[in-house]
Amino acid sequence: MSGNCKSPVILATQNPGKVREIAAIYARLELELRPLADYPEIPQIREEGATYADNAAAKARAAALRMGMVALADDSGIEVDALGGAPGVRSARFLGPSATDRERNDRILFLLEGISEEHRTARYCAAVAVARPDGTVRVFDGICEGRVAIAPRGTAGFGYDPIFVPEGAQRTIAEIPPEVKNRISHRARALRAAEPYLREILGLGEQDRRGRDAK
């Protein structure tokens, strides 16, 4: 992620797992992806929005305006139908800020005890926001349908990956190789949707204005 000919983009996230995934998915692009840890002067943005798009846009806009650079951020979560769509936009804060991934996964499995496989449907949702230096933001969405497993399986990935089985698969996200996850995941789909716009504003070609303006 270095080189004088590459276009710098701030990744407005503190999650090292997300940084690795974004870097892998965008590896073929001429980008210099700079993690938020490189910019301690950027204030931490609390994720208080009502939607994934709200949170992603707030983080990307704050970084872009503070540093005068293009910034990219995402917000994502798991929505479990049997739980009324919870934890949803609060996925990262489910059970409080100090809870571990394992504790959050265990709680969802506890709440779904006795629920049959056919009623354990769920989806991973992601919103990727791309902000220009002037604070203009566009948001792109990605969804991966699936179901919640009976028990956690696998050690790869992070978050809810050990309990999420993508539609049509038998293994959890945490059981599949990273290169497979980065083709099918909600974040991968949102990043692919954002790629044409990112190329456009950075002058990398393949212009496309799909997406929606963020408020």
Image (cartoon, helix red, strand yellow):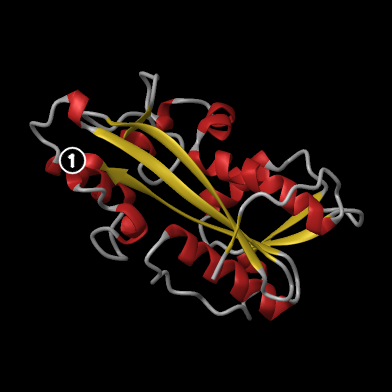
Q: Residue at x 61, y 72 (%)?
A: 61
Residue 24 occupies quadrant? top right
Image location of residue 189, percent across then percent down: 56, 39
Residue 158, relative to residue 130: is it above or below?
above
Image location of residue 36, percent across then percent down: 62, 66
**Which residue in the structure is indicated by mark 1?**
82
- Neighbour class for label 1 at 10 Å: few (<14), some, many (≥20)? some
Instruction: Give the quadrant of the C terminus.
Output: bottom right
Farthest-out residue, right = 5
Residue 42 occupies quadrant? bottom right
The answer to whether residue 107 is left or right of residue 146 is left
Image mark count: 1
Out of 104 and 144, give the one closest to the viewer: 144
Q: Residue at x 55, y 32 (%)?
A: 178
Residue 133, relative to residue 151: is it above or below?
below
The answer to whether residue 1 is left or right of residue 23 is right
In this view of the protein, can residue 1 be seen by the observer?
A: no
Farthest-out residue, left = 114
Q: Amino acid at mark 1?
A: Ala
Residue 20, relative to residue 60: is it above or below?
above
Out of 200 and 20, give the one closest to the viewer: 200
Q: Residue at x 27, y 53 (%)?
A: 87
Q: Residue at x 43, y 74 (%)?
A: 46
The answer to whether residue 138 is left or right of residue 120 is right
Image location of residue 140, percent across then percent down: 57, 51
Out of 83 and 210, give the one closest to the viewer: 210
In this view of the protein, can residue 175 be seen by the observer?
A: yes
Q: Secondary structure at mark 1?
A: helix
